[in-house]
Amino acid sequence: MTLDFTNLDVDKLWLSTYETFYMTLIALAGTFVLGIVLGLLLYLTDKNGLWENKIINFITAIFVNVFRAIPFIILILLLFPFTHFLMGTIRGPNAALPALIIGAAPFYGRLVEIALKEIDKGVIEAAKAMGATTRGIIFKVLLPESMPALISGITVTAIALIGYTAMAGAIGAGGLGSYAYYAGFQRRAFDIVFICSVLIVIIVFIFQFIGDYISKKLDKR
């Protein structure tokens, strides 16, 4: 096996790289919002929480645990009907977004819950004593205090999402995973597989660097 890169189509490579960034960034935004909602629900409805509610907590926990447990490649297949209904197609970068978000948000939701539980209870009690509303506690205490951990969590999730995009690409979602599998692996063009792997690793390092930088800037300790 030689890596002479004669099989490489630069235009397709750049398009695939763009599609990977596109899927990752859009899915990451959706994951951040849905994950925050899930994490807050898990935290606030837990025992002694501000919205203590066993039923809502149980339902939220079941949703999170079930979708965290399903392997991503199987989740994509299970969501084909939903994806087709929502997006009108099951192929292309846009079609991968529902599965990417639903697959990653429960994972991030648990990280959000853990981050919120690490906040000093005294800070929350002080906010209550000053007459802060639940909304005020959420947006002025819980989220700001946990933000460094939330950014670290979304960084970890972003790296998982990059891996998810590669798996989604293997069934027609586009991106570097698709290019590596269809143009590379299936045609035994391992130079394409190699360069796609290198680019995915570089993308991971980019997200890790940005996430670590932002987290350190927000950490006032």
Image (cartoon, rainbow, N blue to C red):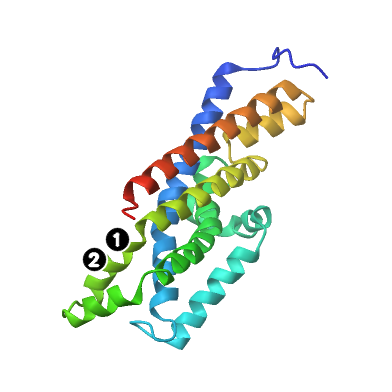
Q: Nearer the viewer, residue 85 or 130?
A: 130
For the residues labelled 2 and 1, say whether their Cβ atoms are less than 8 Å apart.
yes
Q: Nearer the viewer, residue 145 or 82?
A: 145
* Residue 187 location (% of width, % of height): 77, 26
Quarter holding the C terminus is bottom left
Residue at (45% x, 52% y) in the render: 152
* Residue 87 location (% of width, % of height): 48, 50
* On screen, residue 65 above or below 202: below
Q: Nearer the viewer, residue 217 or 116?
A: 217
Q: Amino acid at mark 2?
A: Lys
User: With 129 as the anchor, is 58 left or right in this view?
Assistant: right
Q: Is residue 33 visible?
A: yes
Q: Residue furthest left?
A: 130
Real-space CA distance between mark 2 and mark 1, rounded to the nearest whole angstrom: 6 Å
* On screen, residue 101 above or below 13: below
Provide the residue designation for mark 2. 140
Residue at (25% x, 72% y) in the render: 137
Q: Residue furthest right?
A: 1
Q: Secondary structure at mark 1?
A: helix
Provide the residue designation for mark 1. 144
* On screen, residue 178 above or below 112: above
* On screen, residue 90 above or below 38: above
Q: Is residue 89 visible?
A: no
Q: Quadrant of residue 74?
A: bottom right
Q: Nearer the viewer, residue 140 or 79?
A: 140
* Residue 200 numbered mark, or none: none
* Residue 180 location (% of width, % of height): 68, 31
Q: Amino acid at mark 1?
A: Pro
Residue at (55% x, 47% y) in the render: 161
Crowding at dot 2, Cα within 10 Å, few <14 / some 14-19 / many 20+, comes out as few
* Residue 1 location (% of width, % of height): 83, 19
